[in-house]
Image: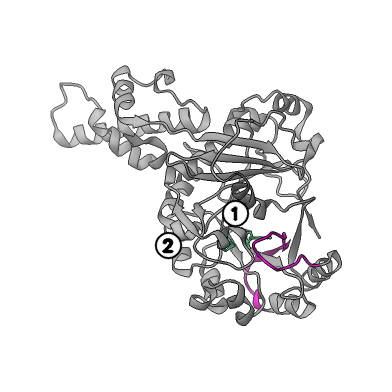
Amino acid sequence: MIIFQSLTKAEFAELLIPLSTVRRSETDPEVIEVKKRKQAKLRAQQIFHWVYQRYITEWDQMSDIAKEVRAWLKENVQIFRLTESYGQQSEDGTFKFLWKLNDQKTIESVIIPAALREKIGEEVIDALDDGKRFSGVETEKAGLNKDLDGDSWARLTACISSQVGCAMACKFCLTGVQGLDRSLETHEVVCQVLELRMRAPITNIVFMGMGEPLHNVKNIIKACQIMLDEDGMNFSKRKVTVSTSGLVPAIEELYEHTDVSLAISLNSSTNEQRSQIMPVNKKWPIETLLAACRKVPLGGHRRITFEYVLLKDFNDSPEDAHRVAKMLQGIPSKVNLIPFNEHSGADFKRPTDDAVLKFQKILINKGYTATVRISRGRDILAACGQLRSLFGTARGTEKHRDFKPQDAAVSETQA
Ligand code: SAH
Ligand code: SF4
């Protein structure tokens, strides 16, 4: 069986060509070929709408697709569903989902709400409380998809995984400590977003869950193409962000094929420091990484996000902040400071709030946009890996019931 969500629209259309029909009176082979292709393309568009915009996962429900085509699809193409083995709202206002894959391995996705009640409207909140499913049209109506480009608008960010585990071995990261199990297939990446969208009106996607997306770049490129496809998930390129520890050749490859936004896990102000906590730095040091960043075709007003995990007495000094400000000069950038989330897999400590704010202030004074990821309790990103280790293989069937984005606790401060 071919899996539907593993194919881009162009690939799916190619598959449908033999099913296309033309009038018997048509005899010119070239004309026949063109007409068949056109019909296949149209059908691929229709089916993409059914699955990615209307969340229909049964071929028989696709009423505008010819019966014979549906019959063939039923025999040959599977619309994949992820099995939810655990879904829960955590204390910090985020929603965690644990999915069981066909080989029994588990991965996580998290929904991070950053929403103001009045921005959403009672209608939507009530519907969400009922666990109602949303269509793209409804979220549009609710104003959730409006691009207000401010810091106070409703946002539901899906934080998704790209691999089971991670091979990059960053010293501060729980997933890194666990090592790599395997990379995710395209459909396993796409379906995390699809499943979440069936449950809540996701507005943004970040590849900041488990794994190094660019260590699985081919599948991530395809997944991004499906996410950005206007007949597919129809996300704006500004709303899909790939986060990487810095696999330089893969950054170049990514931008040859798709145009998502980029986040770089910088995490240090010198090569010596960075190599100590991120082995990838030995191969592609900071200057090589930043040179690649300068070449990213950003266009418009897009900027690269530089993530910086603040580790107490390691990379959190004012001198570090000054060095970061200096090294990012000339790159359209914003800095996202993440106070380290402590866990049993690493000895690092979370810096004091005072040190965090001081660090932020230095960057702001140098003219940067610098945000601090605040979280009540456990930080969501590290909690990704933690949830998996807590439950090992999947267990429990509890589903989330009350999705209340107004409970959002993970937010960003921006100056
Ligand atoms: N592999 C990719 C994406 C997943 S990690 C990458 O490294 O960019 C997403 C972010 O979580 C990275 O910026 C990483 O530095 C950060 N992170 C990992 N462990 C953390 C922890 N314990 N506390 C705070 N941030 C952490
Ligand atoms: Fe992998 Fe990212 Fe964790 Fe590093 S920080 S080990 S690249 S998931």
Mark 1 sits near ligand 1, with its Cβ under 8 Å away: yes
Screen quadrant of the N terminus: top left
Asked which colour scheme the image uses, the reply is one colour
The residue lying at 25 percent from left, 28 percent from top is 19
Picture quadrant of ligand 1: bottom right
| Magenta segment, prevailing SS (helix, strand or loop) | loop
Please give left or right for residue 121 compared with residue 298 in the image: right
Where does the magenta region start and end?
327-351
Residue 358's x, y, as percent? 83, 70
Camera-side residue: 65 or 307?
Answer: 307
Place residue 331 in its image quadrant: bottom right
Label 2 environment density (alpha carbons within 10 Å; few <14, some 14–19, many ≥20): some
Camera-side residue: 280 or 358?
Answer: 280
Place residue 138 in its image quadrant: top right
Q: Secondary structure at mark 2?
A: helix
Q: Amino acid at mark 2?
A: Glu
Please give left or right for residue 37 compared with residue 60 in the image: left
Please give left or right for residue 384 compared with residue 58 in the image: right
Q: Which residue is mark 2?
A: 253
Q: Amino acid at mark 1?
A: Met
The residue lying at 76 percent from left, 80 percent from top is 319
Label 1 environment density (alpha carbons within 10 Å; few <14, some 14–19, many ≥20): many
